[in-house]
Image (cartoon, rainbow, N blue to C red):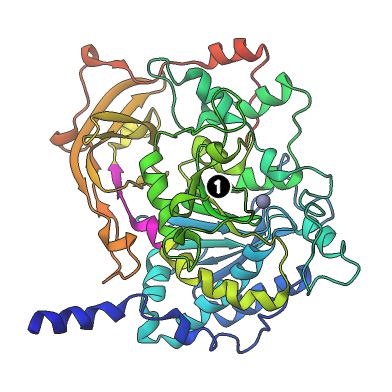
């Protein structure tokens, strides 16, 4: 009997009940209405003022850059609120997470959920209730960035497209989807897939931060005069390269499913399963949202009769329909960040009286997904001081269960910390140090068993950090190689790419 008692005692500690306390956070704001762009900003300011120790409100870009606009086409700013123990700074060992809502201006559920989420987290922090201690753990151990709208101009177009006003919902399926220039932002990111698909069978090809290897912005713009990056796209790209994000979701409407990379097919066909090198991990990440959602993972969740059901409430993006130039694949190929796309319901702009139900559908998933940033492995790479300016480090992973290399390395932050999300299994995790020519000069391999059970089920016992795997090249376990042992890790394919695109090479620093 003793064991049973312990079991019962542990269960409610985590995710005890969001439902019980959901009404207590509505002390100040009305969550049964849609919030316009001014009200959205007011809520963010109010949350920041109520929780100044753990939040920071900022607009993008944070640093001026000649190539990065300061506002959207209609002069709106893109606002972000950050939750962290030390807002405003990256802390070594603390992973960076983001949620982005309302990329398509007429898909508004994410926007409202994220506003309520930030208020809910702030309230949990102030009240310090035992039921909410996992939320406070999350704030202590994560840097969470929340952008409720990426397309405020589109929202304005959508919300004025209905003569009866928008609180009763908007039925127009397309008005406000694009930005004020009429461009779909989720088709407007650099199409790195096409480059990756061209090189991925070549030996020693770069498999991460593709545009930084290839200076791709300029190349793409020159190679194809029709490519023009929108103001919102440039602002987002600059943000993605400023913060070392590890995990992200961007929120849409029009269906009910968690969508994971790749989003673009290899051969240009309209629908074909296109696995990314991290397919296994991405499927787990998508399930961490869909399974905990009240409806998404339950089956039968389809918006049209003729549509086929999404098994487990997840889908490979390209298998559903191919999206070239999407933000999700850009995150994966251009940064360390693994992003999924959440479709939060059939109705793109539902009536305001549906928002409470949508909140209850999503609240546990919203937290469970954030906890996934603490899965896989993390650690620090320590290099001798005299290597710092002359080397690059990649974190490479070999999956020992399938005996295959995962063709997607990540790179440590400038502080030396790294985060490698991985699904359960046996791996060899390696820190590979190269010189500027891409020649491997040092390498350290570690056998790792990943067991994410602490963060993948709904009823978690206690939140935990990801397993720590450090690499120290200042001691003998990770020594530098002799010159004779050098080998190509990356070959320099810039010339190849330049020839392919038949253009120049001036770097554009996004
Ligand atoms: Zn959308």
**Is 347 covered by the magenta stretch?**
no
Q: Secondary structure at mark 1?
A: loop
Decide if residue 464 is on the left or right side of residue 44. Answer: left
Q: Which residue is under mark 1?
A: 308
Residue 445, quarter of the rendered image: top left
Q: Quadrant of the C terminus?
A: top right
Name, please, the residue furthest toward the right.
Answer: 163
Counting labels gives 1
| Residue 34 in view in this figure | no
Q: Nearer the viewer, residue 56 or 357?
A: 357
Decide if residue 7 is on the left or right side of residue 210. Answer: left
Vertical relation: 491 (above or below) 410: above
Q: Nearer the viewer, residue 358 or 340?
A: 358
Vertical relation: 487 (above or below) 401: above
| Residue 2 in view in this figure | yes
Residue 30, quarter of the rendered image: bottom right
- Crowding at mark 1 (Cα within 10 Å: few <14, some 14-19, many 20+): few
Q: Quadrant of the N terminus?
A: bottom left
Vertical relation: 165 (above or below) 60: below
Q: Nearer the viewer, residue 220 or 310?
A: 310
Identified at 21% across, 22% down, the residue is: 481
Q: Nearer the viewer, residue 221 or 238?
A: 221
Boundaries of the magenta span: 371-381
Identified at 16% across, 38% down, the residue is: 475
Where is residue 302? Give x, y as percent: 58, 56
Name, please, the residue furthest toward the front.
Answer: 305
């Amino acid at each position: 009997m003793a064991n049973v008692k312990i079991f019962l005692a542990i269960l409610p500690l985590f995710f005890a009940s969001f439902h019980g306390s959901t009404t207590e956070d509505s002390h100040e704001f009305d969550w049964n209405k849609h919030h316009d762009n001014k009200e959205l900003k007011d809520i963010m300011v109010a949350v920041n003022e109520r929780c100044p120790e753990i939040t920071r409100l900022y607009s993008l870009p944070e640093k001026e850059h000649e190539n990065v606009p300061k506002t959207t086409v209609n002069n709106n700013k893109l606002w972000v609120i950050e939750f962290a123990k030390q807002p405003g700074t990256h802390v070594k060992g603390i992973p960076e997470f983001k949620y982005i809502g309302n990329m398509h201006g007429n898909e508004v559920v994410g926007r409202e959920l994220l506003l309520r989420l930030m208020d809910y987290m702030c309230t949990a922090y102030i009240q310090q209730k035992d039921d909410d201690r996992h939320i406070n753990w999350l704030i202590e151990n994560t840097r969470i960035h929340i952008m409720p709208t990426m397309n405020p101009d589109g929202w304005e177009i959508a919300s004025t497209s209905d003569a009866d006003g928008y609180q009763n919902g908007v039925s127009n399926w397309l008005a406000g989807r694009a930005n004020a220039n009429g461009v779909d932002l989720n088709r407007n990111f650099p199409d790195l897939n096409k480059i990756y698909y061209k090189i991925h069978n070549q030996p020693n090809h770069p498999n991460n931060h593709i545009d930084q290897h290839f200076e791709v912005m300029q190349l793409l713009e020159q190679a194809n005069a029709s490519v023009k990056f929108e103001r919102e796209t440039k602002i987002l790209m600059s943000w993605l390269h400023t913060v070392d994000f590890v995990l992200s979701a961007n929120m849409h409407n029009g269906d009910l499913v968690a969508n994971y990379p790749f989003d673009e097919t290899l051969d240009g066909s309209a629908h074909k399963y296109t696995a990314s090198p991290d397919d296994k991990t991405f499927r787990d990440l998508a399930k961490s949202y869909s399974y905990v959602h009240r409806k998404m993972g339950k089956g039968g969740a389809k918006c049209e009769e003729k549509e086929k059901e999404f098994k487990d409430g997840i889908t490979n993006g390209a298998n559903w329909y191919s999206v070239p130039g999407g933000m999700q694949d850009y995150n994966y190929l251009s940064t360390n960040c693994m992003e999924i796309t959440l479709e939060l319901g059939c109705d793109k702009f539902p009536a305001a009286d549906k928002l409470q139900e949508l909140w209850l559908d999503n609240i546990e998933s919203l937290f469970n997904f954030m906890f996934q940033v603490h899965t896989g492995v993390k650690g620090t790479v320590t290099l001798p001081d005299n290597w710092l300016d002359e080397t690059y480090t990649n974190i490479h992973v070999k999956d020992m269960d399938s005996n295959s290399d995962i063709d997607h390395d990540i790179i440590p932050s400038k502080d030396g910390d790294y985060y490698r999300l991985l699904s359960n299994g046996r791996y060899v995790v390696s820190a590979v140090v190269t010189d500027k020519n891409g020649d491997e000069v040092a390498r350290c391999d570690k056998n790792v068993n990943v067991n994410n059970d602490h963060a993948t089920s709904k009823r978690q016992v206690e939140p935990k950090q990801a397993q720590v795997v450090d690499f120290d090249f200042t001691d003998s376990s990770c020594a530098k190689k002799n010159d004779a042992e050098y080998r190509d890790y990356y070959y320099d394919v810039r010339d190849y790419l330049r020839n392919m695109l038949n253009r120049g090479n001036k770097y554009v620093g996004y």
